[in-house]
Amino acid sequence: MSSKYPVAYAVGQKIKSLRKSQGYTVFQLAKEIDISEQQLFRYERGVNRIDIDCLVRVLEVLGVNIGSFFEEVTAGMSQETERNEQHIPAHFDSKALSIF
């Protein structure tokens, strides 16, 4: 993950994926939810954290249930964590890593 806000990054990536799968451009979706293209782009990259009211508007436009949205986001984050843990060399143990 390339954001200092990993949850915001995961949420943004999911929004981007849903937007693209439903054929919306950044311009179209931003217009539908009454924000700038730049702001939506920042949300999708995890640079800015989306507030709950804006997220609800996005999900309403995309026709996505908020519960299933967060289930998918957390599942994706869990998979990312597992992938990252697989890259830890075997000679490091949890005590050695705890100092970081």
Image: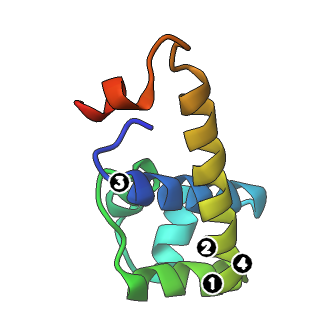
N-term mark: 2 or 3: 3
SS at badge 3: helix
Name the one closer to the observer, 75 or 17. Answer: 75
Q: Which residue is mark 2?
A: 70
Residue at 35 percent of width and 30 percent of height: 95
* Category of crowding for the residue at label 4, using alpha-carbon neighbours closer than 10 angstroms: few (below 14), some (14–19), many (at least 20): few
Name the one closer to the observer, 27 or 74. Answer: 74
Residue 51 visible in the picture: yes
Q: Is residue 57 left or right of residue 53?
A: right
Q: Which residue is mark 4?
A: 68
Q: Amino acid at mark 4?
A: Ser
Expressed as whole percent of the image width and height from the top left, the position of residue 29 reads 55, 69
Whether 7 is drawn above or below 35: the answer is above
**Mark identifier at residue 66:** 1
N-term mark: 4 or 3: 3
Q: Amino acid at mark 3?
A: Arg
Q: Amino acid at mark 2?
A: Phe
Looking at the rendered image, the quarter that the N terminus falls into is top left
Contact (CB < 8 A) between labels 4 and 3?
A: no
Q: Amino acid at mark 1?
A: Ile
Whether 65 is drawn above or below 23: the answer is below
Q: Quadrant of residue 81?
A: top right
N-term mark: 3 or 1: 3
Mark 2 to mark 3: distance in Å? 19 Å
SS at badge 4: helix
Choose mark 2 or mark 3, whichever is in front: 2
Expressed as whole percent of the image width and height from the top left, the position of residue 53 reads 40, 89
Contact (CB < 8 A) between labels 4 and 2?
A: yes
